[in-house]
């Protein structure tokens, strides 16, 4: 398509502006929305950087109302959450409108074409420098800081960090039962919950696209809706569900309850990981199985799931990492015994212990990298992003 | 075994009638082709028979077993119908070997392992594919994949075989061979089969009877010869093979369905009728290019027209000419090259008089006049 524009006489910049970017519109809008929600829900940054200097954001406000204050103002939290939900629903509706007629954006037609590099000429050094500056500021610098802090008693520009080297923070987080438990809990939720989650999400995707369930179209929206809900609100929602529905009270404050909340929250991720693969499998595959004598569920089990194996492993790897980091929806749901790494970090931070927080963060990064290595090597998964 | 009956089938997609009142019968052991241009509803009809599509209206019966009856709310799921189906893309499961692909349907029927082996051996030898059990589909050629797809549809001995353009992915030479052995296999197994295609040559070569469809409706049902030689309406005449159409009015009606039609400019033409007509009625006369003969200096008989060669195409086995005549442009196929001014002879028995309505479902029925 870019080639067609070039041949029609458009220069590279014009092509980028008139063809490439408009084609990316769904992706841009979608990631814009996700970023917006992420910004609305992110708790750690306002808590860590904002609160001390008096900048109050919505999520830290909710957190304060619910956790820090002496009395928990559940009513007010719920009211605030509903406001956010209404606002986000409007945003989603707007996005749907802007994207109307999705087929306009179908670019993959099954015929492979090679991506062509755009020659930038002299500005390429500047462009590369800009990219690397971003990587350095956003990833490398904080990472170095965290690692340094986790190994030092006190990190200060006025002191040689090598003189205050210590393993105390690690000793603390591995030695203290509640902290060690949070690492184990996070790992368990990521490992088992991720596996159950991706299977559940695959099933949702298959019901939505490959069944004659009468409400399947609606299911697509339901499955994507959690993307609009800030994690902290998911947590509040689950808290109320556990409190109000008889029989579910037992789930409150357990890692099973946390896992349920995490899975619900990340259904759109699983949906996004599995559905492109589902579209690639011709419907004649399942039709052939049905005609030959297999029921719908047998067709799913014997034909579709095996064909989707790669996407499922990819989705599993993604969920593992996401669950390991997740804290926003856990804040209202955890208790003694069901701590996860994210909640422990927040607790520690509130006590002013930045050293152990960094140590936990390093553990998290190491677990993630290890997992990526395993996923790449053993499961043969290609992980992007 | 029994016959398959389809009655009053209707299916709507987003408000558009894809299948509009289709009824036909497939006799025991018969091979019937559903033929038509893309979007005519032939595949939808086949999917309704397989149970892959739920019709809005209609009855589908196999013997005394009712597969679908919308009035009574009966709908048998596809896995309960015991049909075999070959798909256009073959739809072999890529994660299974040939053996596993073939065994799948047998396992669903709880056939014992030893019997599964025996049956797979039988079907592979029948299709001359011995020794391919442990290959994966991607290790097979297109022709082999096509035969495995057929084997998978036949190995559990279904009561009816459905084929959805199974040869359309093969190259021309292979397709012709496949036609022969497919027909031979169907006759050897005496299995009732429905074949969907848009390729008229395939339909004529393969089937006992052809059902021609257009825009969700049946335009003709008959043996390949009936359909080709005595098309009941202009659509069928044009879709199967090619055809010249001459407009005119009925002048006189003679013996043995012989009719004289007055063409434009008052030129009379002797022709044959399938329907009952009355004098003065506007009609279309259909003549196939292969049936028109070219005389360069021949005697002036009846049913001749002067023609002038406008252009020609060399087709290998024959020549195709476009000629200008007093009643319009005619396409003619000839075995010898010609040029300039010629005389065309239109044999009355190959000039078929059809009612001048486009849809073809008005006017008399073919049975009225034909003998």
Image (cartoon, coloured by chain):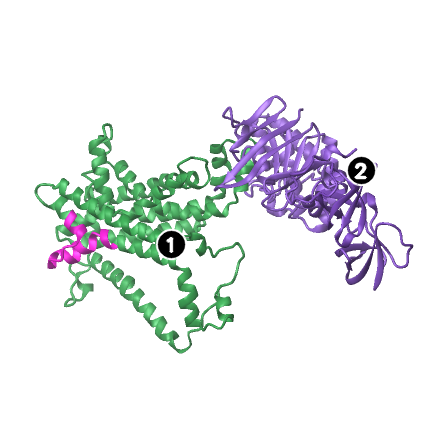
Chain colours: A green, B purple
Mark 1 falls within which chain? Answer: A
Location of residue A219 in the rendering, given as x and y in whole percent from the top left corner: 37, 40
Q: Residue furthest right?
A: B299
Of A339 and A329, nearer the camera is: A329
Q: Residue at x 47, y 36 (%)?
A: A300
In the image, residue A59 lies in the stretch drawn in magenta: yes
In this picture, residue A166 sits left or right of residue A307: left
A73 is higher (above) or lower (below) than A30? above
Location of residue A166 in the rendering, given as x and y in whole percent from the top left corner: 19, 57
Please identify the quarter of the rendering in which residue B88 is found.
top right
Q: Secondary structure at mark 1?
A: loop
Q: Over which residues does the magenta segment extend? A: A39-62
Disc 2 to disc 1: CB gap under 8 Å: no
A356 is higher (above) or lower (below) than B110? below
Q: Is residue B337 visible?
A: no
In the image, residue A55 lies in the stretch drawn in magenta: yes
Q: Residue furthest bottom?
A: A122
Q: Which is in the foreground here, disc 2 or disc 1?
A: 2
Please identify the quarter of the rendering in which residue B369 is found.
top right
Q: Residue at x 40, y 60 (%)?
A: A24
Q: Which mark is residue B257?
A: 2
In this picture, residue B115 sits left or right of residue A161: right
Within-10-Å neighbours for mark 1: few <14, some 14–19, many 20+: some
Within-10-Å neighbours for mark 2: few <14, some 14–19, many 20+: some
Of B267 and B341, nearer the camera is: B267
- Residue pointed to by mark 1: A99
Image quadrant occupied by the C terminus of chain B:
top right
In this picture, residue A218 sits left or right of residue B219: left
Q: Secondary structure at mark 2?
A: loop
Q: Residue at x 33, y 72 (%)?
A: A129
Q: Is residue B131 visible?
A: yes
Q: Residue furthest left?
A: A70
């Amino acid at each position: 398509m870019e080639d067609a524009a070039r041949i029609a006489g458009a220069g590279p910049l014009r092509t980028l502006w008139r063809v490439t970017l408009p084609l990316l519109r769904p992706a841009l809008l979608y990631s814009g929305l996700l970023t917006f929600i992420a910004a609305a829900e992110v708790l750690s940054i306002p808590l860590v950087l904002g609160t001390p200097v008096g900048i109050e954001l919505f999520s830290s406000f909710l957190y304060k109302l619910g956790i820090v204050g002496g009395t928990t103002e559940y009513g007010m939290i719920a009211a605030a959450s509903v406001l956010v939900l209404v606002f986000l629903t409007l945003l989603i509706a707007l996005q749907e409108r802007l994207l109307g007629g999705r087929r306009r954006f179908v670019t993959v037609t099954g015929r492979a074409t090679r991506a062509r590099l755009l020659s930038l000429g002299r500005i390429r050094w500047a462009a590369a420098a800009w990219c690397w500056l971003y990587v350095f500021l956003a990833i490398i610098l904080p990472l170095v800081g965290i690692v340094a802090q986790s190994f030092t008693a006190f990190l200060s520009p006025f002191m040689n960090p090598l003189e205050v080297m210590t393993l105390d923070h690690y000793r603390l987080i591995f030695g203290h039962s509640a902290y060690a438990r949070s690492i184990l809990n996070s790992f368990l939720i990521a490992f088992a919950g991720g596996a159950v989650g991706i299977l559940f999400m695959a099933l949702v995707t298959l019901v939505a696209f490959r069944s004659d369930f009468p409400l399947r179209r609606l299911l697509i929206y339901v499955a994507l809706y959690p993307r609009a809900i800030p994690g902290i609100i998911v947590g509040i929602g689950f808290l109320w569900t556990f409190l109000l529905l008889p029989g579910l009270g037992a789930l409150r404050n357990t890692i099973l309850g946390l896992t349920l909340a995490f899975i619900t929250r990340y259904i759109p991720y699983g949906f996004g990981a599995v559905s492109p693969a589902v579209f690639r499998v011709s419907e004649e595959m399942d039709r052939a199985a049905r005609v030959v004598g297999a029921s719908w569920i047998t067709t799913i089990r014997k034909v579709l799931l095996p064909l989707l194996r790669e996407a499922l492993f990819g989705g599993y790897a993604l969920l593992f990492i996401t669950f390991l980091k997740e804290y926003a929806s856990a804040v209202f749901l955890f208790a003694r015994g069901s701590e996860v790494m994210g909640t422990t970090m927040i607790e520690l931070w509130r006590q002013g212990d930045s050293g152990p927080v960094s140590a936990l963060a390093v553990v998290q990064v190491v677990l993630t990298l290890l997992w990526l290595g395993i996923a790449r090597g053993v499961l043969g998964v290609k992980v992007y992003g | 075994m029994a016959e398959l009956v389809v009655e009053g089938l209707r299916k709507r997609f987003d408000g558009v009638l894809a299948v509009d009142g289709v009824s036909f019968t497939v006799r025991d052991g018969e091979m019937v082709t559903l033929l038509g241009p893309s979007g005519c509803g032939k595949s939808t009809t086949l999917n309704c028979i397989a149970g892959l599509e739920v019709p809005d209206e209609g009855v589908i019966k196999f013997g005394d077993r009712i597969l679908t009856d919308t009035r009574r709310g009966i709908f048998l799921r596809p896995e309960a119908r015991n049909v075999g189906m070959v798909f256009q893309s073959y739809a072999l499961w890529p994660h299974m070997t040939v053996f596993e692909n073939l065994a799948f349907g047998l396992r669903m029927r709880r056939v014992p392992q030893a019997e599964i082996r025996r049956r797979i051996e039988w079907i592979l030898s029948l299709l001359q594919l011995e020794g391919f059990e442990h290959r994966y589909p991607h290790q097979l050629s297109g022709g082999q994949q096509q035969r495995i797809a057929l084997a998978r549809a036949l190995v559990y001995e279904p009561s009816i075989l459905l084929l959805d353009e199974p040869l359309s992915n093969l190259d021309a030479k292979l397709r012709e061979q496949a036609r022969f052995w497919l027909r031979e296999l169907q006759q050897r197994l005496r299995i009732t089969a429905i074949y969907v295609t848009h390729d008229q040559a395939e339909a004529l070569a393969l089937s006992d009877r052809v059902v021609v469809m257009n825009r969700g409706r049946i335009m003709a049902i008959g043996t390949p010869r009936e359909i080709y030689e005595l098309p009941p309406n202009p659509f069928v005449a044009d879709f199967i093979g090619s055809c010249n159409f001459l407009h005119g009015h009925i002048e006189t009606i003679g013996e043995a369905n012989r009719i004289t039609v007055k063409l434009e400019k008052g030129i009379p033409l002797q022709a044959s009728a399938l329907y009952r007509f009355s004098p003065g009625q506007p009609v279309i006369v259909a003549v196939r290019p292969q049936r028109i003969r070219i005389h360069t200096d021949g005697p002036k008989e009846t049913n001749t027209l002067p023609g002038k060669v406008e252009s020609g195409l060399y087709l290998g086995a024959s020549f195709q000419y476009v000629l200008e005549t007093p009643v319009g442009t005619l396409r003619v196929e000839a075995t010898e090259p010609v040029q300039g001014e010629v005389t065309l002879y239109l044999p009355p028995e190959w000039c078929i008089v059809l009612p001048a309505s486009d849809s073809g479902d008005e006017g008399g029925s073919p049975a009225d006049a034909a003998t």
